[in-house]
Image (cartoon, grey):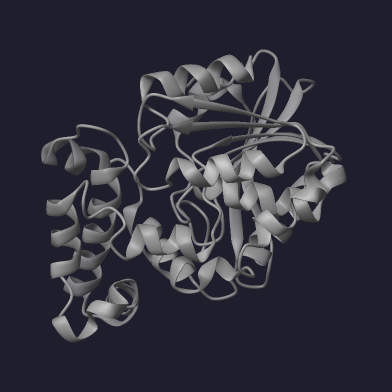
Amino acid sequence: MEQNYIIEKGYLQVSDLHKIYYEVCGNINGEPYLFVHGGPGAGFSENDKRFFNFDKQKVIFFDQRGSSKSIPFGCIKENTTQDLVEDINKLLDHLSIEKISVFGGSWGTTLSLIFAIQNPTKVKNLLLRGIFLGNLNSIEHYINGGIKNDFPDVWNRFKNNVPLDHQKKIAEYYLDKMLNGTEEDKEFYSYEWAFYEISIFKQGLTVNEVHAIISQFPYQSLSIMEAYYLTNHCFIEEDFILQNTNKLNNIPVTIIHGENDNICPLIYAQELHKRLDSSILYIEKGGHSDTEPEIENRIIQVLK
């Protein structure tokens, strides 16, 4: 994307420890949008900008605490879901934005929904791709074998990096190695965690394609943050989102979900849709990735 679309960029100090990186792109007088990246820990990328029309929209991109360009990199201290919600408020205040449309994908749907539940007057509408509710069933599916029937080789590779006596706490083992292991351990377990996710996020990827995708983003922060958040139940009460959907009654919600999403099964998107007063659910051919052609086209169509 052309760099001249960037209106403003920089670091916002959100705590004594953390600075978050942000960019404001597009038309300074355009309709404001907030892009909420997934992971946790993935950060935003130049490729995420393709969805927007910068002639008409003003879009805020930011890296959540510990993610990508934010400082300190991969840091789990002072890093909870509530911290991230408060960071969004600080960023909007800093940019003098009172009400905004929000587009989040995957973990970005979790954070977007929690932000909207806590700040309903600040959200004009929600566009959510690949619903992740952050509840026990969603987490267990992802880190404790929910994908093993569809991707037995991928699951075995992920699981077999963990000794037999730690098999009941695979994610905890990975996290410990990423935080406290040798430099070789940190690199190995970060890479293997990312390999696991990327192997199942899109249909029909080859091993070489998975390696190529991992080389394009800061996988270390993705792996650390995902393991840290998922082993801490995303720092939210069980079924917090589903139990608070009444707070979203005045916010139009559009949900886009792949029918064969192996990371975030479709049933959770359908459950959320059922509980919302004003939501539209598009079920598209594809998996979890926003690069699946029908998912990508639907996002662009909705954002127009």
Residue 23 placed where, x, y %?
61, 38
Identity of the residue drawn at 66% across and 30% down: 59
| Callout count | 0
Q: Is residue 229 left or right of residue 185?
A: right
Depth check: 275 or 204 in front? 275
Depth check: 293 or 187 in front? 293
Which quadrant of the structure image shows residue 201? Answer: top left
Residue 52 placed where, x, y %?
58, 21
Which quadrant of the structure image shows residue 176? Answer: bottom left
Residue 16 placed where, x, y %?
67, 73
In this view, 216 is above or below 241: above
Residue 252 placed where, x, y %?
76, 31
Identity of the residue drawn at 47% across and 61% down: 137
Identity of the residue drawn at 38% across and 35% down: 289
In this view, 19 is above or below 211: below
In this view, 278 is above or below 132: above
Q: Is residue 50 left or right of residue 247?
A: left
Q: Residue furthest bottom?
A: 165
Query: Can residue 258 be seen?
Result: yes
Quarter holding the C terminus? top right
Query: Can residue 215 be seen?
Result: no
In this view, 299 is above or below 208: above
Q: Is residue 172 left or right of residue 99?
A: left
Q: Is residue 43 left or right of residue 189?
A: right
